[in-house]
Image (spheres, helix red, strand yellow):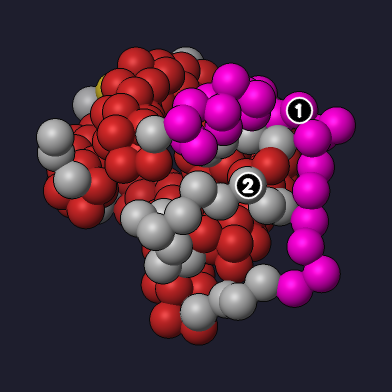
Amino acid sequence: MTDLPKLLKERQLHSRIFVGFAILLLLVSRPEQRGVWFNQTSIWFGYMLVIIGAFGRVYCSTFIGGRKNDVVVREGPFSIVRNPLYVFSFIAVVGIGIESKMLSILTALVAVFALYYPRVVAKEEAFLKHKFGDTYDAYLREVPRWWPNFSLWSEPEQVDAKPVFLRKTAMDAAIFFLPLPCFVIIGKLQGAQILPVWLTLP
């Protein structure tokens, strides 16, 4: 049985490889020309989703930070959905796709997430089921994997949060805010003909 830290490292490596290819594509692509209203709406709506996703991940870490290998956490966001960190990541990824103003990029991001992360979650759940047995089996039966059931919400009066995990999660979540300024810079460089434009994407 593969341990959880190894699964997490594999996920991080695959994510970095995908991001690298995405950056290369964006450097030589631009969105179809649309009106100012569309562009501004896309930027602000996408940015709002990124904020929700990033801060949602930090909030989740107050409940799970440093305890995932030790106990089945069923408090806060983990009481209504089994994978709230991935749910919030998905929200942020959708926001980034909208910020790009390219439906093709948004579709690609959603497709990659939908195809890749269910396999990652299945492996993590197999590990946790092997480790925690009946306790985790009950969690699997009672709490949905992806779509939150808000009627299950349970929140303790206090949690024993670890600052080091909050800091690491906040630093990881900050990455979601980088694409927007990158889109702006790439657009400026393409407009100045410093970067080539090989593709115009819808």
The percent position of residue 132, horizontal first and vertical second, equals 39, 41
Q: Which mark is residue 74?
A: 2
**Amino acid identity at mark 2:** Arg
**What's the distance in space between the residues labelled 1 and 2, CA to CA?**
13 Å
Secondary structure at numbered mark 1? loop
Whether 154 is among the magenta residues is yes
Q: Residue at x 23, y 26 (%)?
A: 198
Q: Residue at x 56, y 28 (%)?
A: 138
Position in image of residue 1 (x %, y %): 14, 35
Left or right: 67, with 22 as reference point: right
Answer above or below: position of 13 versus 22.
below
Q: Is residue 200 visible?
A: no
Of the numbered discs in the image, which one, if any, rests on residue 122?
A: none
Q: Position of residue 111 (x, y in %)?
A: 40, 17
In the image: residue 100, left or right of residue 11: right
Q: Secondary structure at mark 2?
A: loop
Magenta residue span: 134-158
Q: Which mark sits nearer the N-terminus, 1 or 2?
A: 2
197 sits to left or right of 42: left
Q: Which residue is mark 1?
A: 149
Q: How many marks?
A: 2
Residue farthest along the front direction in this orientation: 134
Please tell me which residue lies in front, 150 or 130: 130
